[in-house]
């Protein structure tokens, strides 16, 4: 039997891998960086597309009556007398009242500008009640969702909501979470439904919440307005 010696010659193997591994490594790094950049671009693109505009608020300027200062001088008032007359603004002090000639007193005078600035506005409460200064109430804005305080408000009067007749006949039960704005005197100023199991219970819950009385929340500088959250549970008896 004849024997044949066949020799196979090939260039693939360790020498070939050593020769080309740098090129393959560079290609792999470029592919990986491309995938990373594509993922980052998709993430920031989604954030940009779903972004929300910042909420806008209304700023109200509240000026106390005591901060208005004295009225302008008499010379300035005379210069603007024509404008004031056209504006139709009625003075609150020293208003001349027409009377019959027989009742006119020769000593009667109209208050000057300086005398008007020193007078205090009063309101008549009836015979024997005396004079009382007019207080201009400031329009209090709702507090922030979170207001720091040292002492939390506590309920001193609780009113249970009325169970709706329709819910009673239908056998409905549920819980309504109501957020109550408690002012500096411990009285509810506003009630807002946060979460509700059934819409039929919302109105009875908010009506009951507005009848609650609290002790005011206290901070070191005095009472503060806060929001409190109260759950109103509607549960049928016997179930």
Image (spheres, rainbow, N blue to C red):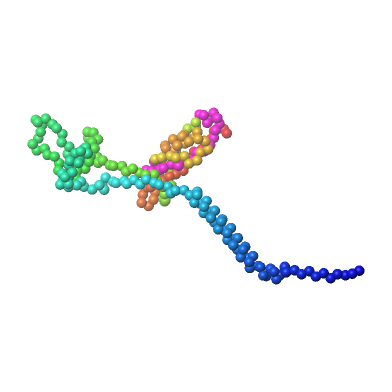
Decide if residue 161 is on the left or right side of residue 62: right
In the foreground, 129 or 161: 161
In the foreground, 128 or 216: 216
Q: Residue at x 53, y 55 (%)?
A: 41
Vertical relation: 221 (above or below) 111: below
Decide if residue 135 is on the left or right side of residue 58: left
Q: Residue at x 54, y 35 (%)?
A: 173
Q: Quadrant of residue 4?
A: bottom right
Residue 138 belongs to magenta span: no
Point out residue 60 in the picture as x, y percentages from the top left corner: 34, 45
Decide if residue 18 is on the left or right side of residue 234: right
Residue 167 belongs to magenta span: yes
Decide if residue 171 is on the left or right side of residue 109: right
Q: Is residue 85 visible?
A: yes
Q: Quadrant of the N terminus?
A: bottom right
In the foreground, 110 or 78: 78
Q: Is residue 131 visible?
A: no
Point out residue 39 in the picture as x, y percentages from the top left corner: 56, 55
Q: Residue at x 52, y 31 (%)?
A: 167
Residues in magenta, as a range:
165-188
Tell how many labels: 0
Q: Quadrant of residue 27?
A: bottom right
Q: Quadrant of the C terminus?
A: top right
Point out residue 147 in the picture as x, y percentages from the top left corner: 42, 49
In the foreground, 216 or 224: 224
Residue farthest toward the right in the current orientation of the protein = 1
Point out residue 153 in the picture as x, y percentages from the top left corner: 42, 45
Q: Quadrant of residue 103?
A: top left
């Amino acid at each position: 039997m004849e024997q044949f010696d066949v020799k196979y010659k090939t260039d693939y193997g360790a020498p070939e891998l050593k020769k080309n591994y740098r090129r393959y490594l560079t290609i792999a790094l470029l592919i990986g960086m491309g995938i990373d950049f594509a993922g980052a671009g998709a993430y920031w693109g989604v954030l940009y597309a779903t972004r929300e505009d910042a909420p806008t608020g209304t700023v109200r300027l509240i000026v106390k009556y005591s901060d208005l200062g004295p009225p302008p001088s008499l010379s300035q008032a005379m210069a603007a007398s024509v404008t004031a007359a056209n504006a139709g603004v009625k003075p609150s002090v020293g208003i001349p009242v027409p009377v019959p000639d027989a009742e006119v007193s020769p000593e009667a005078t109209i208050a000057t500008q300086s005398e008007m600035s020193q007078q205090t506005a009063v309101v008549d409460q009836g015979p024997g009640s005396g004079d009382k200064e007019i207080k201009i109430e400031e329009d209090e804005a709702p507090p922030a969702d979170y207001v720091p305080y040292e002492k939390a408000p506590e309920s001193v009067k609780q009113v249970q909501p009325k169970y709706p007749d329709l819910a009673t006949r239908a056998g409905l039960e549920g819980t309504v979470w109501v957020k109550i704005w408690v002012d500096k005197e411990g009285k509810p100023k506003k009630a807002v439904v946060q979460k509700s199991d059934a819409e039929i219970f919302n109105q009875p819950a908010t009506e009951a919440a507005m009848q609650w009385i609290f002790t005011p929340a206290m901070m070191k500088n005095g009472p503060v307005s806060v929001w409190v959250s109260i759950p109103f549970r509607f549960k049928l008896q016997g179930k």
